[in-house]
Image (cartoon, rainbow, N blue to C red):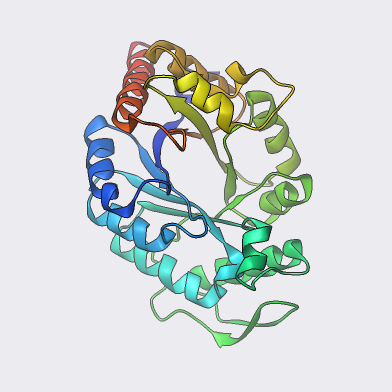
């Protein structure tokens, strides 16, 4: 494995538990710190993902902004394709959307839960990717119904459409239909390796992994409280300690198949700025290693 293959993209995540008015400061800090990516997600009933992504893109010039993920039951694929295409044209090469089932109880809460989430995801991803690639789509399926729909302004550079996945069926669907995976926090490098194998993608896939990271007081305890119980050691599933130790954690995920590692503050992190500084210092360690190699 050469030096470059050990160095993934490194991002920082803006959690929706932070109020929207803190986003601009976070974006400015992330770009100044030299991160490759800034990621966010869309949870009910916090911030809107696409509006937040648009603001983050406008407030930055070099960051790639990832939205991982949007729940497909909440959006018609034609509307989603319009929104994604608009951002892709306004900020070429800097927006990367991801979609998924959404948290099923929340989908039920808003009257959008599908009887077959897998069927909905398959129909939705297929239709939306076709629209983004400039195709005219007519489909009458179980959930998606489009008649001669085409984007007037399809993106000239089509952004990859990723799928957030956990279970084996969703991983297989992501490998078959999407341009990559988003794996949520709490997974170990061994879990990443297994997920990549289950996806069995026939073409190169981006693999984005969220990893909890903390630089403030009681970081380990906060992360331990947030992550679900697992037989795997917590030390394999989080990035805490010195910049070198966080960099080692990033390397371990990269060796397992991650192409992007997104360092994620805990939901109740009292010092997000310290976590950004720690994550940025770890990225510098990785960059220096790459330069020396």
The answer, for residue 154, to whether it is visible in the render is: yes
Q: Quadrant of the C terminus?
A: top left
Location of residue 38 (image quadrant): top left
**Looking at the picture, how far across and down is residue 246, in whole percent?**
45, 18
The answer, for residue 126, to whether it is visible in the render is: no
Q: Is residue 264 above or below residue 201?
A: above
Nearer the observer, 113 or 175 = 113
**Looking at the picture, how far across and down is residue 6, in whole percent?**
50, 21
Q: Is residue 157 left or right of residue 182?
A: left
Q: Residue at x 38, y 15 (%)?
A: 243
Nearer the observer, 140 or 55 = 55
**Looking at the picture, how far across and down is residue 273, in whole percent?**
29, 30
Q: Residue furthest bottom?
A: 147
Q: Is residue 175 left or right of residue 215?
A: right
Q: Is residue 270 above or below residue 173?
A: above
Q: Residue at x 56, y 69 (%)?
A: 74
Q: Residue at x 52, y 21 (%)?
A: 221
Q: Quadrant of the N terminus?
A: top right
Q: Is residue 114 left or right of residue 186?
A: right
Q: Is residue 250 above or below residue 185?
A: above
Nearer the observer, 169 or 223 = 223
**Looking at the picture, how far across and down is residue 274, in whole percent?**
31, 25
Q: Is residue 152 left or right of residue 149?
A: left
């Amino acid at each position: 494995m050469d030096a470059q293959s050990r160095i993934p993209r490194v991002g920082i995540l803006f959690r929706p538990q932070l109020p929207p008015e803190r986003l601009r400061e976070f974006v400015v800090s992330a770009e100044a710190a030299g991160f490759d990516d800034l990621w966010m997600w869309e949870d009910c009933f916090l911030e809107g993902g696409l509006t937040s992504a648009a603001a983050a893109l406008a407030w930055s010039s070099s960051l790639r902004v990832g939205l991982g993920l949007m729940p497909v039951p909440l959006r018609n694929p034609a509307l989603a394709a319009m929104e994604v295409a608009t951002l892709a044209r306004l900020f070429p090469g800097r927006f990367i959307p991801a979609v998924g089932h959404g948290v099923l109880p929340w989908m039920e809460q808003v009257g959008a839960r599908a009887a077959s989430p897998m069927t909905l995801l398959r129909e939705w991803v297929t239709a939306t990717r076709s629209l983004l690639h400039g195709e005219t789509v007519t489909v009458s399926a179980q959930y998606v119904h489009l008649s001669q729909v085409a984007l007037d302004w399809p993106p000239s550079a089509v952004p990859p459409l990723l799928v957030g996945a956990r279970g084996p069926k969703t991983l297989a669907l992501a490998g078959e239909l999407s341009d990559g995976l988003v794996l949520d926090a709490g997974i170990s490098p061994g879990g990443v390796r297994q997920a990549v194998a289950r996806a069995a993608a026939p073409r190169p896939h981006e693999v984005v992994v969220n990893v909890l990271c903390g630089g403030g007081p009681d970081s380990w305890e906060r992360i331990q409280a947030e992550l679900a119980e697992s037989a795997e050691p917590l030390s394999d599933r989080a990035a805490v300690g010195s910049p070198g130790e966080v960099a080692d954690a990033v390397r371990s995920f990269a060796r397992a198949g991650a192409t992007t590692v997104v360092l994620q503050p805990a939901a109740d992190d009292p010092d997000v700025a310290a976590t950004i500084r720690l994550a940025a210092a770890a990225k510098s360690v990785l960059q220096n290693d790459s330069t020396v190699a």
